[in-house]
Image (tube, rainbow, N blue to C red):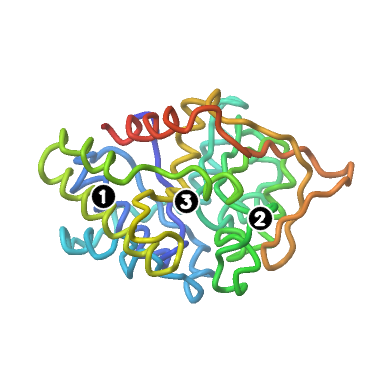
């Protein structure tokens, strides 16, 4: 219950599919019924470019096989953008942390409609961008990282805020997680949840092999997004470098010396990879 609300936007799958997945996962797999889920009012902008890297349901078919429930009216209001604006406005400054693990379209919408409200957040922790590393976004022919490539102008706007912590591909492709250790550790869970993790892990590995991100003999996973959550709970595990960055329209991220841009706190390494893996497993209840 460290995380109170989920705002849903598209990324590897269309925005509506992401909304349904999050609702099903919380209520039917994790059995958590009191965490609100809000649809984005603008993230459909990205739908036509979704990569479907993890299949049409974002979980290699595992989640859609578990449930066909369609969540609708009671979870549709307010939109994620209005929810975020409201909670930041009503809360004391520097008390809310935002974790953004997809395209930043909806955050940019919040900034446009309510200038300054995102600066009230304690920090905005983002998985996105590639500074020195090669990209992985099909939309931009791999010129940029996926989340930034889906909406480069939104990424540039958000990186102009003063409270950004960034986890780029430069870190996330280098810190990989032992697949067999995850599978063994997950056996302590209830059977339904253990099988869910097993199928997700195996499906993710098959996608990585298919897209040449690993070989079949190298059973380690890139789990990009989880670093954001590990950092929020364990910031001391990460090596942070301060940079000034800009993002072009196709999501290419560059270092600059422009004094008008604030510093971005960029995670470029970890002090102990094993401690990061163990912290990630603790986060999901293992």
Q: Quadrant of residue 262?
A: top right
> Helix, strand or loop at disc 1?
helix
Q: Position of residue 108 (x, y in %)?
A: 63, 54
Closer to the camera in the image, 139 or 91: 139
Nearer mark to the viewer, of 3 and 1: 1
Name the image quarter holding the N terminus.
top left
> Helix, strand or loop at disc 2?
helix
Name the image quarter holding the C terminus.
top left
Nearer mark to the viewer, of 2 and 3: 2
Q: CA distance from mark 1 to mark 2?
A: 28 Å
Instruction: Using the image, determine if residue 139 lies above or below residue 171.
Output: below
Q: Which residue was labeled with disc 3?
A: 80
Question: Residue placed at 68% from the left, 68% from the top?
Answer: 250
Instruction: Using the image, determine if residue 256 lies above or below residue 140.
Output: above
Q: CA distance from mark 2 to mark 3?
A: 18 Å
Q: Which residue was labeled with disc 1?
A: 25
Q: Which residue was labeled with disc 2?
A: 155
Closer to the camera in the image, 12 or 269: 269
Q: Position of residue 4 (x, y in %)?
A: 39, 35
Tell me whether the residue at label 3 lies in contact with that at label 1, contact meaning CB atoms closer than 8 angstroms. no
Tell me whether the residue at label 2 lies in contact with that at label 3, contact meaning CB atoms closer than 8 angstroms. no
Q: Is residue 112 visible?
A: no
């Amino acid at each position: 219950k460290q995380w109170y609300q989920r705002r849903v936007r598209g990324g590897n799958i269309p925005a509506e599919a992401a909304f349904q997945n999050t609702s099903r996962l919380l209520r039917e797999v994790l059995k958590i019924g009191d965490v609100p889920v809000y649809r984005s009012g603008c993230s459909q902008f990205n739908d036509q470019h979704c990569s479907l890297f993890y299949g049409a349901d974002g979980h290699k078919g595992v989640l859609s096989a578990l449930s066909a429930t369609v969540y609708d009216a009671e979870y549709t209001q307010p939109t994620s953008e209005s929810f975020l604006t409201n909670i930041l406005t009503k809360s004391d400054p520097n008390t809310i942390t935002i974790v953004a693990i997809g395209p930043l379209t909806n955050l940019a919408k919040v900034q446009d409609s309510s200038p300054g409200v995102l600066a009230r957040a304690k920090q905005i922790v983002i998985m996105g961008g590639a500074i020195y590393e090669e990209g992985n976004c099909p939309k931009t022919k791999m010129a940029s990282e996926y989340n930034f490539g889906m909406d480069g102008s939104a990424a540039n706007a958000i990186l102009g805020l003063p409270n950004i912590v960034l986890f780029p591909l430069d870190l996330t492709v280098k810190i990989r997680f032992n697949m067999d250790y995850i599978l063994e550790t997950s056996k302590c869970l209830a059977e339904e949840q253990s099988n869910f993790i097993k199928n997700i892990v195996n499906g993710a590995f098959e996608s990585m092999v298919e897209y040449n991100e690993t070989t079949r003999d190298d059973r380690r996973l890139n789990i990009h997004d989880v670093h954001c959550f590990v950092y929020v709970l364990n910031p001391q595990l990460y090596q942070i470098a301060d940079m000034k960055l800009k993002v072009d329209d196709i999501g290419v991220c560059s270092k600059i010396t422009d004094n008008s841009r604030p510093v971005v706190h960029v995670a470029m390494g970890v002090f102990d990879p094993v401690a990061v893996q163990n912290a990630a497993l603790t986060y999901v209840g293992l």
